[in-house]
Image (cartoon, rainbow, N blue to C red):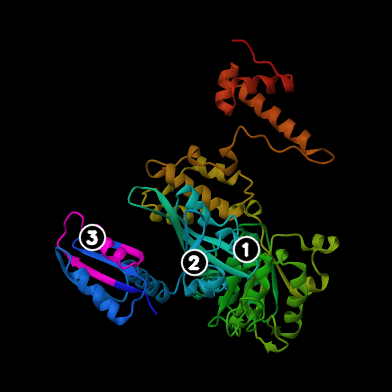
Amino acid sequence: MDKLRLKISNIDRLGLVLDISRALAAREINIISMELELNTIYVEIEPLAALGKQSLIHELSMIELVTAVSEINLMPHQERAEQLNAVLTAVSDGIIGIDLAGRITQYNPAAEKIVRLPASEVLGQAFTAIFPANSPLLEALHAGTRYNNREVMLEKTKSHYLSSGRPIIDKNGRIIGAVAIIKDISAVRELVLTVTSQLKVTFDEILFTSQSMQRVVTFAKSIARGESTVLIRGETGTGKELIARALHAASPRSKKTFVPLNCAAIPDALLESELFGYEDEAFTGAAKGGKPGLFEFANSGTIFLDEIGEIPAHLQAKLLRVLQEGKVRRIGSNREIPVDVRVLAATNRNLEDMIMKGSFREDLYYRLNVIPLFIPPLRERKDDIPLLTQFFLKRCAARLHKETDTISQQALAKLTGYHWPGNIRELENVIERAVTIVIGNIIQAEHIIFDQDYSPAMPALPQACNRTLEEIINEVEQEVLMKAMAKHTTSRQLGTALGLSHTAVLKKLHKHGLTLKRS
């Protein structure tokens, strides 16, 4: 039998709760729970037979200033819990709640699907018994900070999701738990693909004046309408994805899907299922009905495999098979699914060197390198810097709501004289930095700050060949001390500058045989 729950309406008076408790105790009835609100008392007790229940209700209604006694289905806290549960069940995002001790108190059906573990195995468990110890939700609990869209991977179920969370704080300002909202990474991926695959870039939108880039674009246009696999080579930040998108836009597949994937950004454990998909029950927690991979998603269109040099060895053979046969096989299936996909790949790695070292398959290399396309680094196409600078200047000024519209000749000379290890991406950062700090509408040379300028006191790392880590650290430490000594004349000033105690500075000076100059 279900427990008996009573709602006792009353006109509040001193001792009323005590009188109700005595009446129940006289009948040897144990109170399971009691809740108090203004002019209402709720009591939960063990079930009674029909006659006993009516007799008790009559007796309680006779207590002084009790105005009514009625039976209810749920206590207020139970009603609130059911309402909360209804909400948690209805939302499409996963919700995970933990208490101050780190035990899981909330875990809705959407979370079950995303995490791929039933609530019966999760609720009441220590969070770290299920989820990674470095999960951001624990940071929210211990540090009291919020976070947004942090990536989490649960190895045991191969679940991969984005988590946003916050601490739960009571009315006294104390942290009493934390809650996370999680989204399946595949759902996020499909949304991103829906948006990013539609971002079309044409060759007319690629900015250049240099002869080297003219040759690249002319060649790229000539191969765009073909079906051959293209391997785009170039340093980080040279615009490999831009060229890939332009190739797709100029191809007969331009009205179909363009699917970009950064192979280095997906954990090895998930990359196979992302690329090739999986069947129902292919592994513990696999989504019901299975899931198509990106090759199927890109069918009739183009797939762009960026950072192809980072693909793990065990997947290289499977990718080779797709390139050779035009068929994919989902995880957990023997069925081969035909796909009509043009493959564009890109890398900043020396694949030839990787082949020599045995970390990249030679047969896959030749399948990918049907048409090689090399993008020169920015330092080899400095004629493009003025045009690119003006473009980034106009775009950054509009986005930052600044009136900056001019760059001085001295500033431009500083830009063209730099070696640009980060290429076009670094140039864009430098221009945004200048637009942010400049006052007025003209960027001068002093507003051009390169990444290496942020740490002038840090020496370049010495060559590590045939040297121990301790030897390298000692040399760097000595150079840092010597540079700081050029600006500070006392050990206390030196300690303040380096974040060390006076005693620690003296010990390090003695260790390296350095002496402060007397002023």
For image coordinates 70% across by 82% down, the residue present is 332
In the image, is residue 309 above or below residue 324? above
In the image, is residue 449 above or below residue 425? above
Residue 154 found in image quarter: bottom right
Element class at badge 2: strand
Q: CA gap, disc 2 to disc 1?
A: 19 Å
Give x and y (percent) for residue 51: 28, 81
Q: Which residue is mark 1?
A: 265
Quick check: is 22 in the magenta stretch?
yes
In the image, is residue 514 above or below residue 253? above
Highlighted range, magenta:
6-34
Q: Is residue 62 visible?
A: yes
Q: Amino acid at mark 3?
A: Asp
Badge 3 or badge 2: first in the primary sequence: 3
Quick check: is 25 in the magenta stretch?
yes
Residue 182 is marked as 2
Element class at badge 3: helix
Element class at badge 1: loop
In the displayed structure image, the side of residue 292 where residue 169 appears, left or right: left
Front-most of residues 371 and 146? 146
Single out the mark in the foreground, 2 or 1.
2
Q: What crowding class fits label 2: few (fewer than 14 Cα within 10 Å), some (14-19), or many (20 or more)?
A: many
Q: Which residue is mark 3?
A: 19
For image coordinates 55% across by 82% down, the residue present is 256
Give x and y (percent) for residue 79: 33, 71
